[in-house]
Image (spheres, grey):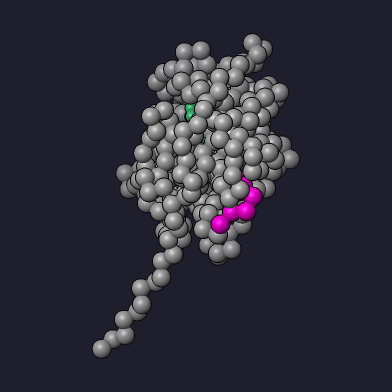
């Protein structure tokens, strides 16, 4: 009789403790009249997407500036991540830092979002609304910063470790960053949208991580979210060819357990249904003739993820 190979032992992370609960959300912050605002800032309604998928050279230059500001604001916010700081304080820091650099914090009043940044802790997948909850030792938090500057948006996020974090969570955060980069590295003139999701999903599977399907990367430029859709899983229907000058985000959300989700009554906060943790990274990039250029990079070349993400020790 053939020897049966023992099934690989699966180490399953437990649900995150304590479970996340809705907190108290403070007032929306105000933006000085001198800061140029996106069209939805007053009404909350961005309207239908009408922008081209491809940027003009002038728009691309503006996106390098907006992207650098978004990266620098995210890096700055990362310096304050420690046990005891509330997500509302992070909102204040991101809000003021965006304005100090002449930018508008894009989330503010986008489709009615009340705050200037998204802060997603532990089993919150994305779109967490900053509130009065202080960060706890052992938490993980995604801070998603988007800045509108010179008529265009730069959108980026990083998951930070708070104090002493368990090994499952560190692995999740490290491999989510690697997965994003694997997806991004498929991009060049003539590549397909589904190449990105295929690479991300392959990496996630290697590490037994779930891939969230309900939220996807998007075209970004003169509009915060434009028509191009970038699934983070392999969708054979996503045959759209990526061509030089297209600008979009790659922003995978990976989970320690099942990636199914539910929303809180605030209609924004998305959480894993099984209560296990989720991590996310995001860059805005442009497709070039022979590859890609990251746009959400600080003027000195830094990115939040390179500075703060734990390093993956697995060879990918
Ligand atoms: N920054 C998020 C993204 O990556 C979108 C946030 S929408 C908001 O697409 F309204 F919640 F800010
Ligand atoms: Co985005
Ligand atoms: Co974002």
Magenta stretch holds residue 297: no
Confirm whether residue 178 shows in the render. Answer: no
101 and 86: which is toward the camera: 86
- Can you say whether 11 is above or below 195 in the image? below
192 relative position to 150: left or right? left
Q: Which quadrant of the figure has residue 80?
A: top right
What x and y, as percent, mark residue 7? 35, 73
Q: Residue furthest left?
A: 1
Main secondary-structure element of the magenta-colored stretch = loop
Instruction: Name the image quarter holding the N terminus.
Output: bottom left
Q: Residue furthest front?
A: 18
Q: Residue furthest top?
A: 33
85 and 168: which is toward the camera: 85
Q: In the rendered structure, which segment of residues is drawn in magenta?
A: 159-166
What x and y, as percent, mark residue 26? 55, 23
Labels in figure, total? 0
Q: Which quadrant of the figure has residue 14?
A: bottom left
- Can you say whether 155 is above or below 277 in the image? above
**Residue at 47% in and 40% down:** 20
**Residue at 58% in and 16% down:** 37
**Residue at 51% in and 58% down:** 168
**Residue at 68% in and 27% down:** 97
């Amino acid at each position: 009789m053939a020897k049966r190979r023992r099934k690989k032992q699966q180490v399953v992370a437990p649900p995150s403790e304590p479970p996340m609960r809705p907190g108290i959300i403070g007032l929306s912050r105000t933006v000085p009249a001198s800061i140029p605002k996106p069209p939805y800032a007053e009404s909350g309604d961005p309207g239908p997407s009408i922008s081209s998928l491809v940027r003009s050279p002038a728009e691309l230059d503006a996106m390098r500036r907006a992207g650098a500001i978004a990266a620098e604001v995210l890096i700055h916010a990362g310096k304050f991540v420690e046990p005891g700081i509330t997500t509302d304080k992070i909102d204040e820091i991101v809000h003021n830092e965006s304005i100090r650099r002449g930018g508008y914090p894009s989330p503010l009043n986008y489709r009615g979002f009340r705050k200037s940044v998204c802060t997603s802790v532990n089993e919150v997948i994305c779109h967490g609304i900053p509130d009065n909850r202080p960060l706890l030792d052992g938490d993980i938090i995604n801070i998603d910063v988007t800045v509108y500057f010179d008529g265009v948006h730069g959108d980026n996020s990083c998951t930070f470790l708070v104090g002493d974090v368990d090994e499952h969570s560190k692995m999740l955060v490290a491999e989510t960053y690697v997965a994003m980069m694997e997806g991004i590295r498929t991009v060049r003139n003539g590549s397909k949208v589904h190449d990105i999701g295929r690479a991300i999903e392959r990496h996630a599977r290697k590490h037994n991580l779930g891939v969230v399907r309900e939220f996807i990367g998007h075209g970004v430029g003169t509009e915060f979210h434009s028509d191009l859709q970038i699934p983070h899983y392999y969708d054979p229907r996503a045959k759209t060819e990526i061509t030089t000058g297209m600008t979009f985000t790659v922003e995978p959300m990976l989970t320690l357990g099942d990636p199914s989700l539910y929303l809180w009554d605030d209609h924004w906060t998305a959480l894993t249904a099984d209560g296990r943790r989720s991590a996310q990274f995001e860059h805005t990039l442009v497709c070039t003739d022979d590859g890609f250029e990251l746009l959400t990079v600080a003027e000195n070349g830094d990115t939040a993820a390179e500075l703060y993400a734990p390093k993956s020790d697995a060879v990918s």
